[in-house]
Amino acid sequence: MQQNPMTVITAIKPNSLQALTDYLKPIGKDIKKNDVIQFSHYQQLHYCSFFIIPSNHPSGNLSATPALLVFEANIDGEISTFINDLINDNSVFMNTVYSYCQDYQDNAHLGSYLLSHDYGANAFYVAHPGQARNVIYEQQQLRKDIEQYVDANRSTLLEQPEKIRETIANHFSSTSKPKPQPFLNSNGDMIFKAILAVLVLTLLGGLFGFLGSIAQIIAIAVLVLAAVYAIVLRSHESSDKQDSRPWESPNVSAVQDVEDRQLQNHLTSVIEIKSGCFRLLTLKIVLFGINLVAKLVATKGDLSGIVTIHFARWVILPDKKRLLFMSNYDGSWENYLGEFIDHASQGLTAVWTNTQLGENRGFPDTKWLFLQGGSRDEQRFKAFARNSQLAELIWYSAYPDLSVKNIGNNRSIHEGLFSSSNLAAWLKCL
Amino acid sequence: MTTLNLQDVQGIVFSGYNKYMSCSSYYLLQINDAKKTKAWLKNLLDQGQITHGEDKANDSTENRLNLAISYSGLEKLQLDEASLNSFERSYREGMYSAHRSTLLGDQDGDAPEQWLWGNKANSVDVLVLLFSKDASIHAASQKQHQAAFKKAGLSIVWHLDAGEKRQDADGFAVEHFGFADGISDPIVEGFPTASGAAAIATGEFLLGYPNQYDGKLTQIPISEQFGTNGTYLVLRQLKQDVAAFWTFMDEEAARQGITADYLAAKMVGRWQSGALVEPNQDTDPKTVSNDFDFSKDPDGKGCPFGAHIRRANPRAVGLGTSDAESLTVANRHRLLRRGRSYGKALENPRSDDGQERGLVFICLNANIERQFEFVQHTWINNVKFAGLYDEDDPLIGRVGNFTIPDEPLRRRVCGFQQFVSTQGGGYFFLPSLSALGILGNS
Ligand code: HEM
């Protein structure tokens, strides 16, 4: 089962901002017990959130645009199915929310309205591709049962590893076999390397004339283009100004208020893309690359060394002037930002170096797109990220008590019931 | 090589004065008359009473004194708003604030509302740390300073006395559960105490110097002149229930067919002597060393992932794809511990005497959010630490579950009570001597 990103972005009617906020906020405060909508009812739903992007966020540059409502979800299967389920089962909620938004007509048109406002994602990362919500639930239950069994029988179980596995497997013989993982989880890495190799070889082969003169011209053109790109990039980088004010967005307190209420957190960041088509183009190329890496390489609960992200996505807003980033992660904000800096400085710098909090308030100074500077300037980067954040009104997690590592481990436990290879590693999972 | 102006840095940064000062007291004070407090501060400085790094103790040294100020203290000393806002957010909000308490796990019985001091009702402005060579000198010094507090417009909200400290044969302090403490201390560049290769940049513990992120400077409050050579000081009064701890160890060990010492050592990660718990060890080898990075114990078969010292500093395992990367990450979250035990040692550790005892946990760091709070939240309290499911630090946490990796099957200890609870705490700024001068003259 494939996981998909839904990002429905709609303009809020003038004068409806407060009423919409007042409607959503109490639901978010009591996500488990409110009597309006129970998100746990939707079995395909991993995470979802509702939040508002004020017209003046992050700076006043865009004050002419209306405030936007974003309804974002990570789901198993088709987005249209999810939308239909929502409209069927929680029509009052859905219609109330969207009656505050521009171009909303009525219940009958709500489905197509939402679908036509779904912007998906420019780049989308899933920690465990293919793991449906229900599978995650089942495997957690299985792990708990096995844990209990081992706790109760530890002294009699202490035998040869093969014997231990056999005893446990026999005891849980009614468990059904896990579905095989998606093809790309195990082969994407190779495909990615193959694509890179083909690109490099074609370029080199073309350059040295092994592939004919047309290929040679193209290869030379590519190199010239790259050189021109590099020059333009450096000229942008040397004139861009980093945010040097010790400045804290008024949103920070609101953001902090909805943080750390449980083991996982949700991060929403909206930031301006630096003006001009050069930065927009660069951003699109980088996001394309990240998406490719996410699909092919980062398929095992690890996004370039960050092991705490369940789902993440980057969306260029319809106005093409702002970048939206969202993620559902384990642990605290401080840890999350730290992991970004410690392990994924290059990727994140390549993305956000194209952005700013406002005129002359850019991302920390960067050289060569990602090679130097940028997020390595720890405190400046953290302040930049903090100031771009928005507090969500509603946030739902289907499994707030499971970490990315837990989910991977549960899967290994399940698989190990049916395989006797690598026994020692399996026993460590229990 | 960083050269420090040692005369400008308060002495507690470099040493807990364990060698020469056997007594100490911690005064938590409230400012009632800022003008008088400033005069007192100026006077302390003029008389050279505030111990700095150049002022090295020896056998005849009688006293040491250091001083730190909370955010409310700075407010009362009438710093302007821009200056106040230049301090880091956690310090401004205070340890008792709602968001900080959630982060630190100060909930229910540990919630600030239950604290003896440091909450809204009993807020603290100034912390004075007094040390003396022996009990009689200490008594005299306490008397003298208490009188001075009165004249300085300072009232005592709370105070903690560390009884004469317990030391083991190796010269390490022994905390109330009976374990050697103060063994692992970061070796900091430019510190007079640093011998051998310094592992940690000065800027992790003193403002105004390069830190562990490519030598960047950590944000300096107010101005370079004010902030340089200062740092943040975190203090927590952590009550230890020694009898409950050892009684539980006895019972559980008997149930599992192991020894109480073994179980307790697994929880700490070191044996009582301070020796690291290594794979295939059943008893204390009594060879204390800090020269390890867990790379010889990647699966936690000696020192469990969940053990106190492995959570508090995971070193080279688990924080990156290589040992070196993990170590780099771990070293961005180090603490300079400067606390001591308070209260008398429990004579029979299995039988409670009704008296309070515990640890005056003190640590210094240049960034509370990235260092102390991070260690407390992301490592010590984190039930998901190192891929675990539902357990926090077995020694000082609240959950009461603990996994001991073992071959062929892990051992689990479940449903035990909390042994350590928070009684009070605060975030302070430990100014340089020149900053104290600025405050005293303002
Ligand atoms: C009553 C409470 C506590 C007790 C009894 C206690 C006890 C100990 C002991 C016995 C050690 C090993 C000796 C050593 O390496 O120096 C240790 C190490 C350590 N503890 Fe605690 N501790 C307590 C609270 C805390 C707290 C609240 C923190 C931080 C949030 C903390 C952080 C550390 C660190 C960083 C180390 C050194 C780890 C290393 O570098 O190997 N401790 N503690």
Image: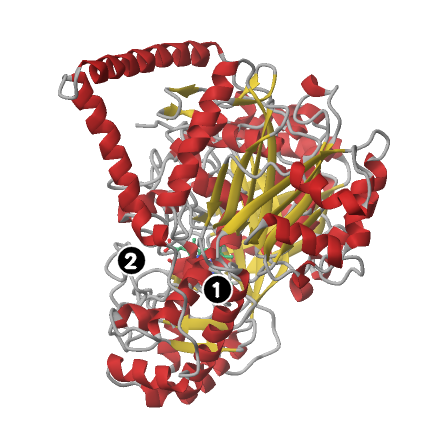
Please state which of residues B435 and A387 is positioned toward the viewer in this rendering.
Answer: A387
Tag 2 residue: B294
B245 relative position to B437: left or right: left
| Residue in the picture at 18% in, 13% down | A213
Task: Give above or below for B38 relative to A126.
Answer: above
Q: Is residue B364 visible?
A: no
Residue A155, by quadrant, is bottom left
Task: Give above or below for A157 relative to A255.
Answer: below
User: Where residue B293 is drawn, which disc sits there?
Assistant: none
| Residue in the picture at 48% in, 67% down | B395
The quarter of the picture where the C terminus of chain B appears is top right
Please state which of residues A58 and B117 is positioned toward the viewer in this rendering.
Answer: A58
Q: Is residue A303 visible?
A: yes
Q: Position of residue B182 (x, y in %)?
A: 39, 56
Q: How is the image coloured?
A: secondary structure
Task: Give above or below for B205 relative to A201.
Answer: below
Secondary structure at badge 2 equals: loop
The quarter of the picture where the N terminus of chain B appears is top left
Q: Position of residue A60 (x, y in %)?
A: 70, 19
User: Where residue B393 is drawn, which disc sits there?
Assistant: 1
Residue A90, by quadrant, is bottom right
Ligand 1 is found in the corner quadrant, namely bottom left
| Amino acid found under the numbered disc labelled 1 | Asp
For label 1, the crowd category at 10 Å Cα-Cα, with few meaning under 14, some 14 to 19 and many 20 or more, is: many
For label 2, the crowd category at 10 Å Cα-Cα, with few meaning under 14, some 14 to 19 and many 20 or more, is: many
Identify the subunit bearing mark 2: B
Identify the subunit bearing mark 1: B
Q: Position of residue A15 (x, y in %)?
A: 86, 31
Secondary structure at badge 1 equals: loop
